[in-house]
Image: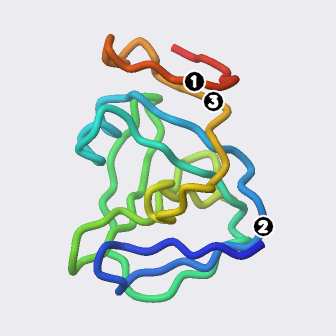
Amino acid sequence: MTREASCSCGQLTLKVGGEPQRVSVCHCRACQRRTGSVFGAQARFLESQVVQHGQAAIYERQGDSGNGVRCGFCPRCGSTVTLRLEGLDDMVVVPVGAFADSEFPAPGVSVYEARMHPWVSLCGELTHLD
């Protein structure tokens, strides 16, 4: 199975082989701001599963965990296409929306639920973490 993720303008793309190691939703404030939504949905892949095409600019920040996060985004349209998490150096995290695929696997984990908006309701079997 090969999937393609892309920024909005198509300048920055990823070819991703195989299934994600984990799919999750994150309710932290940084993901809310990054996505402009009430949570972020992302999939973790091994570095060896991902091939990047195009140029990415990098924004570095500290995550709610205290670890560093490097966001790779398109310098033309601003879409975030990759996240790299300190301590998970062999992983590439890709926002699920970058795949624009309604058949993408559902999340199995929901994190930072203490920051979840009270009107959000998630279905399916999830591991719930505050």
Give the labeled residue for mark 2: 18
Q: Against 45, is 11 above or below?
A: below
Q: Against 103, is 81 above or below?
A: below
Q: CA distance from mark 1 to mark 3?
A: 11 Å
Earlier in the chain: of badge 2 and badge 1, it is 2
Q: What residue is at 24 percent from the left and 77 percent from the top?
A: 75
> What is the secondary structure assignment of the residue under circle 2?
loop
Which residue, as the protein is rendered here, is positioned at the far front? 102
Q: CA distance from mark 2 to mark 3?
A: 19 Å
Residue 109 circle label: 3
Q: What residue is at 58 percent from the left and 17 percent from the top?
A: 129
Q: Is 110 placed left or right of 112 in the picture?
A: right
Q: Exactly how many numbered labels are in the figure?
A: 3
Earlier in the chain: of badge 2 and badge 3, it is 2
- Say which quarter of the image contains residue 4: bottom right
Q: Against 110, is 82 above or below?
A: below
- Say which quarter of the image contains residue 14: bottom right
Amino acid on which the number 3 mark rests in the picture: Val
> What is the secondary structure assignment of the residue under circle 3?
strand
- Say which quarter of the image contains residue 52: bottom right
Q: Which image quarter holds the N terminus?
A: bottom right
Nearest-to-viewer mark from 1 and 3: 1
Residue 123 circle label: 1
Q: What residue is at 42 percent from the left and 88 percent from the top?
A: 54
Badge 2: residue crowd in 10 Å (few <14, some 14–19, many ≥20):
few
Residue 84, horizontal then vertical, whole percent: 51, 56
> What is the secondary structure assignment of the residue under circle 1?
loop
